[in-house]
Amino acid sequence: MAGAVAAGISGASADSTLKINAGEAKAKSSPIHYGLMTEEINYCYDGGLYAETVRNRAFKDDAETPVHWSLLDENSTIGLDRETPLNDKIDVSLKWEIRSKRSSRLANEGWWGIPVHPNTRYRASFYAKADGTAGPVRVAIMDKEGRKTYAEGTVESIGSEWAKYELVLETGNVKDTDETQLVLEAGEKRTIWLSLVSVFPPTWNDRPNGLRKDLMQLLVDLKPKFLRFPGGNYLEGNTLEERFKWWETLGDLTERPGHPCPWGYRSCDGMGLHEFLLWTEDMGAEPVVGLYAGYNLNKSYIPAGPELDKYVQEALDEIEYIMGPVDSKWGAKRAAAGHPEPFPLRYVEIGNEDWFDVSGSYDGRFAQFYDAIKAKYPQLKCISSVGNEQSKWLVKSRNPDVLDEHYYRSTDEFIEMAGKGYYGSYDRNGPEIFVGEWAAHEDKNIRPWDKDSMTTFPATPGMLAAIGDAVFMTEMEKNSDIVTMQAYAPLFVNLNEYQWRPDLIGYDAIRSYGSPSYHALKMFSTNYGDEILEASLDADSALHCSVTRDSEKGVIYIKLVNPEERQEKVSIQLDGLEKVASNALVEVMSADPEDTNSIDKPEKVVPVSRKISGIHPTFSYPVPGTSVVVIKVKAM
Ligand code: AHR
C-alpha cells in the first residue's frame, strides 16, 4: 500500500455530487448476498476444480477407444474390454496386452498435461488384474517425450484378481510444468487389465478425492456466502436419463458410473453430491441446491401428476441426504460417508430456467415439488424459475419464496438497467430475488452462447465487461434487501477447451488467474456492510454507486463505478455524520476498456489499495476513467 494521499475537502470543483444519508439506514442488506454458482461446463470440475489429474481414468469417455491413452512403443496393444469390467458400474476396463519380453509403456495425456510442481507428493492408485502374476509396474510422471522422469513409484506385482494398488509419487526440486504425461510401464508377456487410474496432487484441506488448491484459494478469497449447485443445464441433462442423478454420484469411486454432461463431454462424477457439500463447507458457505424438477434440455418433460411422484421422491431423498437425521435412510448414508452432522440447508431450487419449457407444465410441476417439500421441510425456502424477466412469472398456483432471475447482458445493457433503477421498483413484499446467473459481455450482438463469442473474445472477460459487472452489482447491492442472493456465472474455464465465455476464473493444468470481473466481484463481496444507505448521484453523473455500512465497525463502504474513459471528480457528502476518521482506505481498479488478464499476464488488471487522508463528512475524490472504486470511511 502506498503512503496516504490527501483527498480534496471542498466539493466546489467537483464534476458531480454523491449525497449519502448516513444518519439512518435505508434497509438491512442481505447477509448472504454474495455467492457462487457452479456446474460442469468448460471442464470446470473434471479438468478443473476436481484435482484428479488422469483423464478418462475409468476408460468410459468413449465407447470405442481408450481416448487420452496411448502407447509409447510397439511392444503391446491396448483396447477396451467389456468382458472384464471392474464391476457393473465401471463396466469396462483397459486390456493391455504385452506381447514382448521387453517392457512397454502406456501413457495418459492428463487434462492438457499432468501438473508438476516442485517437492510435491502425489497420491497415485489404480485397480488392476493380470492373467497370472505380473509386475513390477512402474508409475511415473514424465515429460512429453517420455525421457525425463519427474516423479515415480513401483508396484511390485499384480495378482490375478481385481485389487487396488496405491503408491506415492514425489517430485524433487523441479520447475512447474504441464509439458508432461503419466506413464505406466510393465514388462514380460502378460495381459494386464486396468481401471480407475488416478493421480491426485495435494488438495484443499488435504481431502482425499479433493479439490485443486489454487482454484479453491481464489474462491475462498471472494468470501462467498452460498454455493448454487449442480446447475444450470447440468442439473437437467439433455435427456431424462442424463439428468443429475445425485445418488449415482455418492460412495466409493468404484460405485460411480459417471454420466454425459450437456456441455459435450462425460463427467466421471468424482465430484458428486457429497463433494459439493464439503466444498461448500470448506468455503464457509451454505448450499443452495438445485433439484431436478422433470424438465430436460431436449424439451422432454414429466407432466405434473402421478408420473412425477418418483422425481419428487428423488428430491425429498436428496434433501434427506443433505440434512436428514443420521437414523434416516439417506442421513445414515451421509453419516457413513463421514459427515453425521446435517449440512445447513435453507434454500432449494425447483428446476432451472424452466422458461425453456414452452409446454407450460412448470406451474404444475413446481406446485407438486413445492407441496411435498413444504409438507416435510416447512423451514425450507423454495426458489422458482421466472420467465427470464421479472414481469413473466411462471408459477401462478403457489407463491414461491424466491425467484431466480438470469441476466447475461452486455455492459451497455447493464448500464441502461442500472440507470433506470432496475430493482428499485420491485415489490418489497413480494418474493426474494436470487440473481442465480449473471455476467456482462462486451458486445450485445455476440451473446455468450453464440459460436462467434468463443472466436471473437478471450475466454475470460476484460475491463469493459468488468465495468458492466460492477455497474450491475451496484444495482443489485443497493437493492440487497430484496435481491437477497446473486451469483456470477460461469465460474471457471479451462483455457484449453471450453463451451462458453465469458467466465470468471481461467486456468490450465498448473496456473490460474482471476479476470478483471473476478477482481470487481471481490472488491464488492469483501467490502459489504449489513445496512444499505440511501445514496444519490447527480442526474447527469456518469458514475454508478452503492453504499453500505457495517453497523458494528461503523465503516461505510462507498462503491463507485465509472464507465466513462474520462476521470470524474465527485464530491461525497456524508449527511448525518459529525465526524469521520481522517484517513480512509481506497481500493481502485482502473484500466483501459480493452485491457484484460490472461494466463501469461494474470495481474495486468488488479485493484490497488491505498490510504487517503484529509477525510471529512464532505470530501471529494477523483474517480479515474474506466474504474471500479471502493472507499472505506470510518464514522467516529
Ligand atoms: O451458465 C451457463 C448456462 O446458462 C447454464 O447452464 C444455464 O442455466 C444458462 O442457460
Image (cartoon, rainbow, N blue to C red):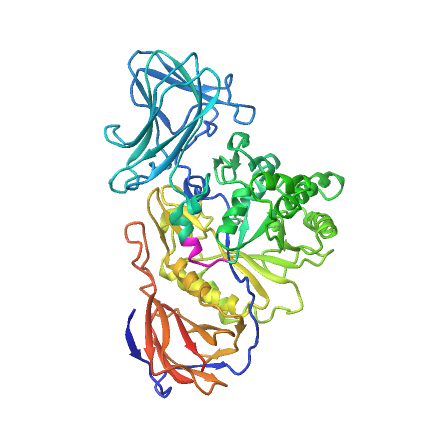
Residue at 45% across, 51% down: 491
Q: Total marks drawn?
A: 0
Residue 159: x, y in percent? 44, 17
Q: 344 above or below 130?
A: below
Residue 254: x, y in percent? 52, 29
Left or right side of 254 for 317: right
Q: 471 above or below 146?
A: below
Q: 612 above or below 140?
A: below
- Judging depth in this view, the residue of 212 and 623 nearest the camera is 212
Q: Magenta stretch: residue 220 in it?
A: yes
Q: 483 above or below 134?
A: below
Q: Can the viewer see residue 472 in this picture?
A: yes
Quarter the C terminus occupies: bottom left
Residue at 48% across, 20% down: 162
Quarter the N terminus occupies: bottom left
The magenta stretch spans which residues? 218-224
Residue at 55% across, 30% down: 255
Q: Magenta stretch: residue 148 in it?
A: no
Residue 28: x, y in percent? 57, 71
